[in-house]
Amino acid sequence: MTAHQLERQIVAVKPITVPTTGRSIDLQVKLTAPVRGERLPVIVFSHGNAWSMDGYEPLADRWAAAGFVVVQPTHLDSRRNGIGFDDPRFGAIWRARIADLHAILDNLDEVVRQAGGLDTRIDRERIAAVGHSWGAQTAGALLGARVFGADGDFTQHAVRAGALIAAAGTGDSLTPFAVEHLPFMRPDYSTMSAPALVIAGDKDQSAMSTRGPDWFTDAYHLSPAPKTLLTITDGEHTLGGVAGEKVAETTDENADRVVLVADAVSAYLLDVFGLDDTPWKALRSNDGGYTIESK
């Protein structure tokens, strides 16, 4: 990201309530956007398990500074809602998460209008779905991924591209705990045809899988082209602390790694959307701390 982009003023508006049906708790979102600019591309971001619209500020702020409007929902599994693994509602939350993103996109004009009239400034032809961890599986569903053994095609055709950060791999190596509590963690990436950037850390060892860090590259290897894989050296599941500074669950605190994740997503999307290929070319020409492969 250029120095000029880093100096761009941004604004955040919350909470904005999104119309939904069949949801016992209101769906609320936070919107972060540049103060100025027209025809702004949109990122709908899905948080990891137990988080909320108030997390992942290091990512959302840099994406807004790069020229994106970022919409972050609070999913039902947020710790503020108190719905844990043993709650009878938990088994269906994976579907509710996907429905949240669809509701946002179905009501996008009204959502952004409530943030100071942004409905006149967004580019409806350039919308991306992005997520981290469980949120990456959620976002992947809008890009065409499905769940083995479950009914439903959740593709959202308004979404033109996306980025999956530390996305779960296939479910054939789930631990007994994951099999019992997270049976939906069996993504089928064979139908995920939309362009996507997959980001994985080469030290990310999941407690939900008996496989190693390569588990988090399945979204790249098992999906059809076009896809790009960014593998971050020494990155663990939090990839430096993408959910926020000094967050307790961060195991690999590294501010530079967070910046890399944020800027890789914005650079990739700017390139895929045909807006600016310079940041992505610069990222690909640098070989320090990560590798990139594409198909």
Image (cartoon, rainbow, N blue to C red):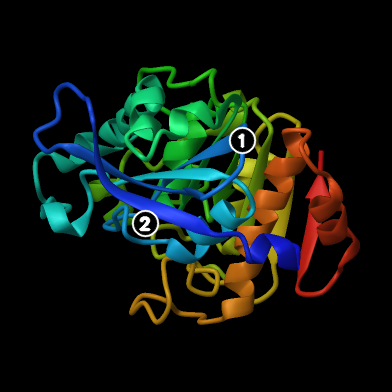
Image-quadrant location for residue 128 = top right
Q: Quadrant of the C terminus?
A: top right
Instruction: Identify residue type, mark 2.
Output: Thr
Q: Is residue 252 above or below residue 79?
A: below
Residue 139 visible from this viewpoint: yes
State the image coordinates of residue 75 (x, y, percent, origin top left).
Answer: 26, 44
Q: Name the residue tied to disc 1.
A: 38
Q: Is residue 80 above or below residue 121?
A: below
Pick the residue in front: 199 or 209.
199
**N-terminal of the two: label 2 or label 1?**
1
- Residue at 42 percent across and 66 percent down: it is 243
Label 2 CA crowd tier, 10 Å (few <14, some 14–19, many 20+):
some
Q: Is residue 12 above or below residue 46?
A: below
Q: Secondary structure at mark 2?
A: loop
Q: Name the residue tied to disc 2.
A: 175
Q: Find the distance from the CA under tag 2 to the CA under tag 1.
A: 47 Å
- Residue at 52 percent across and 47 percent down: it is 169
**Which dot, 2 or 1, sits closer to the camera?**
1
State the image coordinates of residue 290 (x, y, percent, origin top left).
Answer: 76, 67
- Residue at 67 percent across and 45 percent down: it is 197
- Counting labels gives 2
Q: Quadrant of the N terminus?
A: bottom right
Using the image, tell me which numbered label, if any, was put on residue 86.
none
Instruction: Identify residue type, mark 1.
Output: Glu
